[in-house]
Amino acid sequence: MKTSSGHLTYCTNIHAGKDWSTDFEQLKTHFPGIKAAISPEAPMGLGLRLSNAASIALQDGATRREFKDWLTATDAYVFTMNGFPYGDFHDTVVKAAVHSPDWTTPERKAYTLRLISILEDLLPAEQDGGISTSPLSYRHWFRDAEAKAAAVNTATLNLLEVLKTLIALYLKTGKQIHLDLEPEPDGLIESGAEYISWYEQHLLPLGIPVISSAFEISASEAEVLIKQHLCLCYDVCHFAVGYEDHGSVLRVLESKGLKVGKIQISAALKGQFLEYQSRAQVLEEFKAFDEPTYLHQVVAKNTAGSLIRYPDLDEALAKFPEQETTEWRAHFHVPISVDEIGNLQSTQADILEVLAIQQQRPFTSHLEVETYTWAVLPEGLKLPIGQSIIKEMDWVIKHAIK
């Protein structure tokens, strides 16, 4: 739906589907009720998540036409896609496999090119589109700095092949689709600073000559086109887990001409180990979120203000006595409409801060609620899927969009 802050939607990775047939049934079951509650009189956008298998199914012309007819009939449109998870995302152990295949592989490139062809067909006229994607790879897969550097180089070259397709599309048709790289804890790119460093030290030095040669344009023109088509996916949960200063990150991006393609509106889980509160009690409440499906990286802050990183919640729980910590933040997408969770909290305040900046100085037109963990939340936080999405969207509209 179009709001004063941009196009607002939710990511359909919340729906459990392993293939296009299941995905479509989930949309037909849940979306009409959500739209009736949130945007009854105006068109409502979808943040479409397609697995690799679903992206292949939608290459079929008849299948694609059926979906387009449904979008028209339900007064819906697609403007953003989630191209991060390649395979199954529910009812299976995902963990680090969410990064596989990574950007060092031809499979990731081929999958993303299919998503581009689908979005090109679905995107409304005069509307820019975006596809969020993996932060190159998972850092713990690489044994040393040399292996990591080689992976970054290969991944960047593969991304540039996709950028050539996006730029060619734009120059031929005027239709703009941007790839939105999504930093996350333990990704090869996990922070704002790492994204900016990669962009300036790898993407532009490799990309400018490639794009300049491919399209017979100047270096400065090539740089403009790269910055127009490779953007940042600002997942608020991920940046909050790393205790990042949102205002500072966004100011630096702006000063360097680096664009944000999409805000993923999401909240992390946090807990403060306060003197008046039992540390054991806080720790026990974190244990309720230790589940086997997704990675829940933890970033702890110690008494000196330094950060300690753990690759998953179970390891942080096991090593808790090793560090005198004052706060934990965990990569667990908790409901954005909830601030207090027993003796724990969410990073809801970070969402309010980012969306306040967006109101004052707009830096994107794509807003996507991304709470995908409903099936693995502790029982007290669960609601039926349709009600859950409506509650999340309604919270954004009432509290963060003027």
Image (cartoon, rainbow, N blue to C red):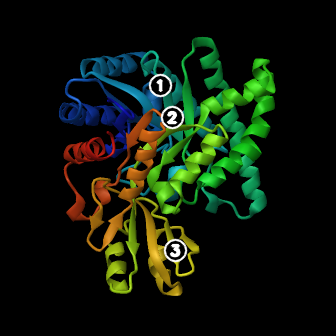
- The reply to whether residue 186 is visible in this rendering is yes
Q: Quadrant of the N terminus?
A: top left
Is 15 or 226 nearer to us in this picture? 226
Question: Which sits in the foreground, 68 or 342?
Answer: 342
Answer above or below: position of 227 versus 198: above
Q: Nearer the viewer, mark 3 or mark 2?
A: 3
Q: What distance separates the C-alpha of mark 3 from that of mark 2? A: 33 Å
Residue at left 38%, top 57%?
Answer: 349
List the residue tagged with mark 3. Answer: 301
Residue drawn at x 51%, y 55% as measured from the top left? 239
Which structural element holds mark 2?
strand
Horizontally, is 373 left or right of 209 in the view?
left
Q: Secondary structure at mark 1?
A: helix
Residue on which disc 1 sits: 119
Image quarter hosting the C terminus: top left
State the CA–CA distance, disc 2 to disc 1.
9 Å
Q: Nearer the viewer, mark 1 or mark 3?
A: 3
Three-letter code for the amino acid on which mark 3 is drawn: Lys
Disc 3 to disc 2: CB gap under 8 Å: no
Give whichever of discs 3 and 2 has the lower sequence position: 2
Q: Is residue 402 above or below residue 189?
A: above
Q: Specify few, some or many for label 2: CA neighbours under 10 Å numbering under 14, 14-19, or 20 or more.
A: many
The correct choice, above or below, for 95 with respect to 30 in the image is below
Whether tag 2 and tag 1 are in contact, CB under 8 A, the answer is: yes
Q: Amino acid at mark 2?
A: Ile
- Determine the CA span between mark 1 and mark 3: 41 Å
Residue lying farthest to the top in this orientation:
172
Looking at the image, tell me whether mark 1 or mark 3 is earlier in sequence order: 1
Residue placed under numbered mark 2 in the picture:
131
Mark 1 Cα within 10 Å, few/some/many (few <14, many 20+)? many
Residue 291 position within the rendered picture, expressed as x and y whole percent measured from the top left:
37, 66
